[in-house]
Amino acid sequence: MKNLIWASCLFFITFTTNAAEITFLDNPAWSTVLEKAKKENKIIFLDAYATWCGPCKQMDSQIYANSTVAEYYNANFINVKYDMEKGEGPMLAERYFVTAYPNLLFINPEGVILHKGVGFHEVDDFVELGKAAKGPSTQYFTLKKKALELSNSDFAKFASLAVAFEDEDFEEISKNYLAKQPDILGNIDLINLIMNDINSLSEEKTLAYIVANKAKMINTGKYTEEEVNQRLVSLTLGFGIYQSALKDENSMDFESIQALLDKYIPEKSFFVYHYFRTQYFIEEKKIPDALKEFDLIIDNTPAKVDFEQLCNTIMSLGPVLAQEGKLDAALTRFDAVQIPAKEAKLAYMKDFVKGIVYIKMKEYDKFKAIADSLIANPNTPENVKADLKSALEKIAQHE
């Protein structure tokens, strides 16, 4: 009798333990998975992982073992795991364009991908991902096939996923979709699309229309004038780069880009143009050319470049300046810049910029000295002080 009771308890413990985890088939033959999915008429959930992937291990220990997750996924999917670096993994990685881990794929019994997620997901998000994979109206790849026929609201949802997935096809799809719209700023869904997801436009007349009608975006109350102006900078620069690539993929047509910036964002044109050239030359490993552009930016502050723009430039370029042995000289020139009265509240930024540069270079002692000074300064904004304290705590934890 005792043995029977013990056996019953063991069975119960085993059963409840298994029920609290997703039941995975581990690296099975892919053909058998498709057969099983057809027989049970279920979608396949494929966890594409790598043994060295930290977030993959987090999904295993924290998410797949959650009872809410297990209940939903075991009931609705054929769950399989594949190491993308062995067995049939490389074949599946190529077929389903797996380039990051974990890649969470939802595939129909015919082997057609329906939906996906990338990276670590918390419990609620992961369950919602599974629910989205079940519905044709929310499956990413189902939406993609009919993207040009989607309503504005549904296309906006598709667009946010496309950007998150870094879908290379989205640029062309979005251009074609906008070309079909009678008014690309006609409603909040289209405005959200322009403000958040579209990175380049195919025609200058589209850019001109957006610039001329920016009040439509501001008047929604959802975006500030500064946010809209920043978006116009991105769209103008993006269009210029797109047009340059059409002419010659191997060189940049700086003259045409400058003309567009002067035309559509004249008040920001000088800074945007020279900052873009700075970044371009850094990317091309043409450091002397990048430094010449930096000199132009600092020489024209505050006449053509505002103080905040200069701060952003130095925070971005600091490590390059240090590498070239020019950081100290640049910071001396930075200290000498006169801050206009209208930007006087940003005076603390002179030290803050140096702190950011030092932390990027892992010169923590220099950062600590500046952070302590800024925290003691009554003119430093409280949110900045909080960020500095947080940074100091993280440094202390790793020392």
Image (cartoon, rainbow, N blue to C red):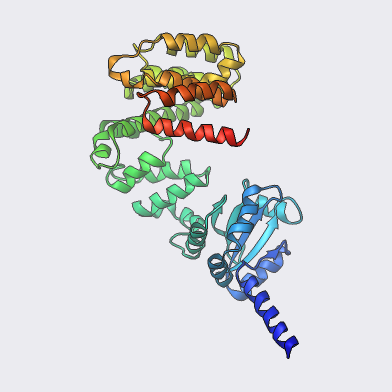
Q: Is residue 14 above or below residue 359?
A: below
Residue 316 percent location from the top left of the image? 50, 23
Up-down: is 87 above or below 201?
Answer: below
Residue at (35% x, 46% y) in the render: 180
Q: What is the quadrant of residue 31 in the picture?
A: bottom right
Q: Quadrant of residue 203?
A: top left
- Vertical placement of residue 160 versus 374, above or below: below
Q: Quadrant of the N terminus?
A: bottom right
Residue 96: tell me if it is visible: no
Residue in the foreground of this view, choosing between 245 and 219 = 219
Residue 83 sits in quarter: bottom right
Q: Residue at x 37, y 28 (%)?
A: 233
Tell me where residue 385 appears, x and y as whole percent. Answer: 42, 30
Q: Residue at x 61, y 16 (%)?
A: 323
Pick the quarter of the image with the C terminus.
top right
Q: Position of residue 258 (x, y in %)?
A: 41, 19
Q: Is residue 11 visible?
A: yes
Of residues 373 and 100, the one drawn nearer to the viewer in this rendering: 373
What percent of the width, then of the height, locates residue 276? 47, 22
Count of marks overlaid on the render: 0
Query: Considering only vertical position in the picture, is 367 above or below 333?
Result: below
* Left or right: 221 in relation to 230: left
Which residue sits at x=58%, y=61%? 107
Q: Name, please, the residue furthest toward the bottom.
A: 1
